[in-house]
Image (cartoon, rainbow, N blue to C red):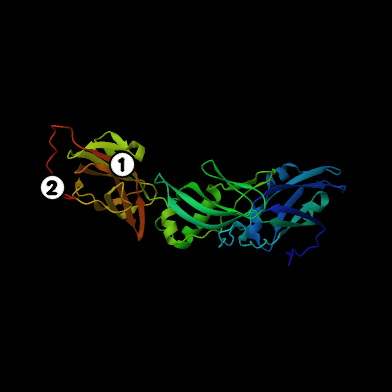
Amino acid sequence: MFVDVGEAVVGTASLVLYNGQRSTCSIKLHNIGREPIESLSVLVSSNDNVTADRCISFDSAALEAALPIKPGDTAELDLNVWAALSFSGAPNTEAASSSLTPQPVPEPLQFVLRIDYSGGPGLLENYYRLLSVAFFIDVIPSVAITHWSILSAEEPEQFYLVIDFDNRTDEEIEVLYPPDKKMLIVGRDRARIPALADRIPLLFSDSLAVAQDACRQHMSEKIDLRWEFVERPISGHCWIGDLTWDPADIEALSLPPVLVEFVCDGATVVKARSDGITVDVGTPVELDVRLTNRFSTRLSGLRVLLGFREESLVSDEVSGHKVVLIGGISDVVIDLGREGNATLNCQVVMLVPGVFHLDAIFELAGRRWSVVDTCCVTASAAASGKAPSSVESSTDL
């Protein structure tokens, strides 16, 4: 059933758009009366106002600037329409692309544009006239998102949103995704893309519902997913604000509350694999772990766990027969004030050659954040004739 605005609709307009496509409707307002139009307001009404607010917009400041509209003059209102309905579709369960599961045709986007206007003596008496135009927008399927997941990125402050796209048309479509990548999908076929994005600065005290809403808003605003036909000048933006996230996803998406920096021998700051350090086996190296509170909220009882991981291993922590961490900082609990900082001092001794990563894990208020691949240490055999330092085989002294 169409939206009921309680007033007679005096005009209609219709559009046909692919899901995600944008268009602009120019509405001309011609003053055929004898009095100037000095006050004018525009309201969009729909049975689904959340969708209408996302899909319909206009420049109210430009409309105000056009006033007054003198008798016989015309003003224009540009109505921006974005067919941003859900892109979630049923996945294809067969191997052949011709057996793609049909995506239900989206319901038409329907809304009423209500224009209230007045001027002259009528405005002095607070009397307004009403003009309503009904819009019908048929939305055609373009691409569909059938599956999504989260993967860690090379930088700890970023992640990959991995999306399975289905091309719901018979034509070739290119999907464009950050950072400046594109993927060609032939008609009725599918492809998987990894979109790079920044992690979300969620407060540790946020509830699951608040975190869900923050994730949806962040994805919609920060991840630019676009599609375009190869043979026709038609393109669109994918709206992903209805994707859902479970607690594990939210943990992977959220930015750790603490910024970590590693300082080697008081000079070299190790922040990424490309800035890694090389040490001799058996030679102690001074390593400072600098922690900075990202938020304006005090972090009380923050647990910090540090552990070395051999590059050839995915998650297993190396034993004390390979790496010695001297200083008692592998598992500590600290307090960080608002935007405060702290430094943990230690010595590291590599006992065998190899490439190792120092990972940091933070626990606070039942939540857990992992910062991996931020400190890379390459241990090389000591030079000939140089005796290695004598240390005890222990991971925490």
**Looking at the image, which residue sits at the far bottom?**
1
Pointer 2 and pointer 1: residues touching (CB < 8 Å)?
no
Q: Residue at x 47, y 56 (%)?
A: 149
Q: Quadrant of residue 387?
A: top left
**Mark 2 closeness class: few <14, some 14–19, many ≥20 residues within 10 Å:** few
Q: Is residue 127 visible?
A: no
What kind of element bears circle 1?
strand
* Between 48 and 245, the one nearer to me in the picture: 245
Q: Position of residue 253 (x, y in %)?
A: 44, 53
Q: Distance between the residues labelled 2 and 1?
A: 23 Å
- Residue 384 occupies which quadrant of the picture? top left
Q: Is residue 352 left or right of residue 36?
A: left
Q: Which of 45 and 128 is in front in this view?
A: 45
Q: Is mark 2 on a helix, strand or loop?
A: loop
Mark identifier at residue 272 = none
Question: Residue 100 at x, y = what percent?
Answer: 61, 60
Quadrant for the N terminus, please.
Answer: bottom right
Badge 1, how many Cα within 10 Å: few under 14, some, many 20+? many
| Count of marks overlaid on the render | 2
Give the side of residue 180 with respect to residue 74, left or right.
left
* Residue at 46 percent of width and 49 percent of height: 160
Kind of residue at badge 1:
Cys
Residue 121 position, x and y percent, is: 82, 51
Q: From this viewpoint, is residue 148 visible? A: yes
* N-term-proximal mark, 2 vs 1: 1
Up-down relation of residue 317 to residue 283 (above or below)? below
Task: Say what amino acid the circle numbered 2 marks.
Answer: Glu
Q: Which residue in the protein does label 2 denote?
A: 392
According to the picture, the residue beneath numbered tag 1 turns out to be 376
Decide which of 345, 35 is in the foreground and name it. Answer: 345
- Residue 175, given in percent of the width and then of the height, sits at 58, 47
In front of the other: 331 or 150? 150
